[in-house]
Image (cartoon, rainbow, N blue to C red):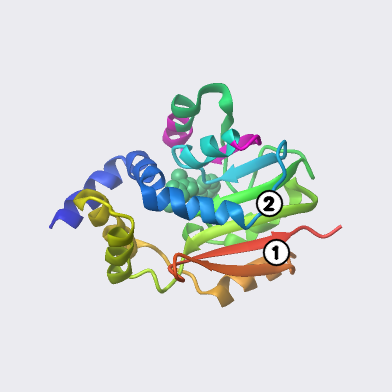
Amino acid sequence: MLGLIILSSALLAPNRLFARLQTQPFGRALNTQWYGLLGLEKDTRLLEVGCGPGRLASTLTTYGHTVIAVDRSWRMVRAARRFAGDRLEALQADATQLPLADASVDAVMAASLLNVLPDPVVALREFGRVARPGAVITALMPSPDFSADRARGIARDYGLGYLDQAMLETWARAARKTTPEQVVSWFMDAGLSDCTIQPLMAGSFLAAVARVGP
Ligand SMILES: C[S@@+](CC[C@H](N)C(=O)[O-])C[C@H]1O[C@@H](n2cnc3c(N)ncnc32)[C@H](O)[C@@H]1O
């Protein structure tokens, strides 16, 4: 019942749901683990696609990156601008038609985006267009192991309160999940053959990391 109430309020205000998921201890730990895989240098020009309310994008600016945050939803872009002010550039655009020049960014990140797109390969090709040779392209998404049971375990491990646990469980039930094989095939089909998959949070999430060829 509580899950249903949370889900309905999330549908009314998904920007609040994503903001909360990204900033409670589990969300911060997941993003930190993901970022830690990338080996990015300071001063890189980083693009986050499907940025939601911009909490991750804003954190990335504190690591010394210049960040462009893109989302298709105007509501999300407005929330990101309100939260981060002029620390980052937030743009409304579709992942498949980015308003950026060829080879103009050093890294592209996308969290919980590829698994919700109708054709992730088209978006990945677009990421490859805007990324310079040698750039990192990376995506984070829930795996089939992210069950409600796992969500409860994560909530216990991170000391989450009742509301955050219920949100995590609701997310685990509702999320579209992706196998490592599916993700690798999307990257390959987009011409990004150098793709490795890293399990995060005991395999509940997958991080795909690829480098654009010369
Ligand atoms: C599940 S949310 C994830 C938000 C954020 N990355 C996070 O992890 O909390 C997916 C986000 O992608 C955005 N989105 C969905 N389809 C998109 C598209 N085709 N182009 C750009 N953004 C898109 C949605 O508006 C939403 O903000």
Find disc 2 in the rendering and name its residue. 127
Between residue 210 and residue 70, name the one nearer to us: 210
Between residue 97 and residue 170, name the one nearer to us: 170
What amino acid does circle 2 point to? Phe
Q: Quadrant of residue 105?
A: top right
Find disc 1 in the rendering and name its residue. 190
What amino acid does circle 1 point to? Ala
Q: Which residues are magenta?
A: 63-79
Relative height, residue 43 to residue 191 (above, below): above
Relative height, residue 146 to residue 20 (above, below): below
Q: Quadrant of residue 214?
A: bottom right
Q: Pinpoint residue 181: horizontal percent, then vertical percent.
A: 58, 77
Q: Pinpoint residue 169: horizontal percent, then vertical percent.
A: 27, 61
Rounded to the nearest angstrom, the CA distance separating label 2 from label 1 is: 9 Å
Q: Residue at x 38, y 69 (%)?
A: 146
Q: Residue furthest right?
A: 214
Q: Quadrant of residue 1?
A: bottom left
- Crowding at label 2, few (<14), some or many (≥20) Cα neighbours within 10 Å? many
Q: Secondary structure at mark 1?
A: loop
